[in-house]
Amino acid sequence: MKNRRNDNTLKSKLNDTAPENILLHDIRKLIEETRTSVATVVNAGLTILYWKVGKRINDDILHGKRASYGNKIVSTVSRQLVDEYGRGFSLKNIRHMMKFAESFPDAQIVSTLSRQLSWSHFREIIYLKQPLQKEFYVEMCRIEGWSIRTLRQKINDMLYERTAISKKPDEVVLHELKKLQEEDKLSPELVFRDPYFLDFLGLQDRYLERDLEDAILREMEKFLLELGNGFAFLARQKRIQIDNDDYYIDLLFFHRGLNRLIAIDLKLGNFKAEYKGQMELYLRWLNKYERCPQENEPLGIILCAGKKQELVELLELNQSGIHIAEYLTELPSRKLLEQKLHSAIKQARLSWQKH
């Protein structure tokens, strides 16, 4: 019986290498590659067309000084186009096109982005309120290849407001995004978040640090999604030995985009000043004994249940490669969360101005 099975396996391998099968494989590959290429070209063409339509209507209404008749003009144009070209030019879609041209006035930028983002991506982004917010999501979609569903989820989870870069002044944010656009390299400020949403852990009011760590390990896939693209889990309770004393790093990761080891320390209460020295020790040990020659210096994230802004600022943790972030095991209402995040951004930017 065993020999017969081996014979069948051998025949299958021989069939795979038969000339007609090799030919069929190559043809399939050509078809799939061409389909992908054609889809990309068609998407780019449609996106540019929609931008041109939106710009043409905007120019006619604004430059022709016929803003008061704008709604009537757009409705008339839409009805005619639907009759001739179908529902893709409905009044609702025409207004999307007008907003698109208004939000992205540079034709060259639209032409470049249309090869990487679909019309559906743009439709989600154009209604965001802040220009830098729009640019952030455009660049992250481009760099990380987000699907429409992923983009919607990131916007709904207020990723921009939770990203460290949003706490910086506008000119710093713009500089980081331009650098990302030109070099395709993520900075820690674009990767790290605050707060992190850990509601999926299912933790109740009272729990220990060990419970938090165990819950993260059980839900590692979801935790990695919350950390963001590029994180790879390496170790739990990473043991390091210094002068015959043992220390343990709660969680150790590697980030491909940053090309760095990332140490994560879990704390139950509010951030305390002594946590800085502990993390600095971990990072220096990792830098000396674990970092490969081609890697950048390790970074650390201290996840706390809370933090006090002035204490964090006085310690100048960014200079030590340490990011302090809160985690939420239960999410407040959307309204309260927005207030909390916007207040944190405002406070952080005021702090930058003082310096």
Image (cartoon, rainbow, N blue to C red):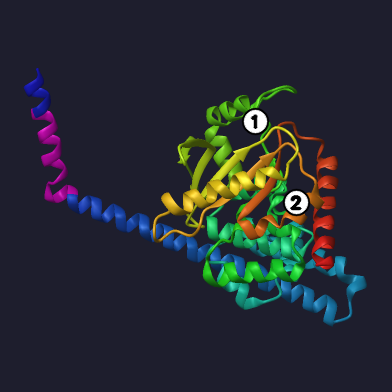
Quadrant housing the C terminus:
bottom right
- The amino acid beneath tag 2 is Val
Question: Which is nearer the N-term, disc 2 or disc 1?
Answer: 1
Residue 270 place in picture, x, y as percent: 75, 38
211 sits left or right of 71 in the view: left
- The amino acid beneath tag 1 is Phe
Residue 254 place in picture, x, y as percent: 48, 48
SS label for mark 2: helix
Marks 2/1: CA distance? 27 Å
> Dot 2 corresponds to which residue?
312
Name the disc covering residue 200, or none: 1
Residue 15 located within the stretch drawn in magenta: yes
Q: Which residues are magenta?
A: 7-21
Front-lying residue, 348 or 58:
348
Residue at screen point 62% across, 74% down: 109
Residue 324 located within the stretch drawn in magenta: no
Residue 337 place in picture, x, y as percent: 81, 42
Q: Is residue 171 visible?
A: yes
Q: Is residue 1 above or below residue 105?
A: above
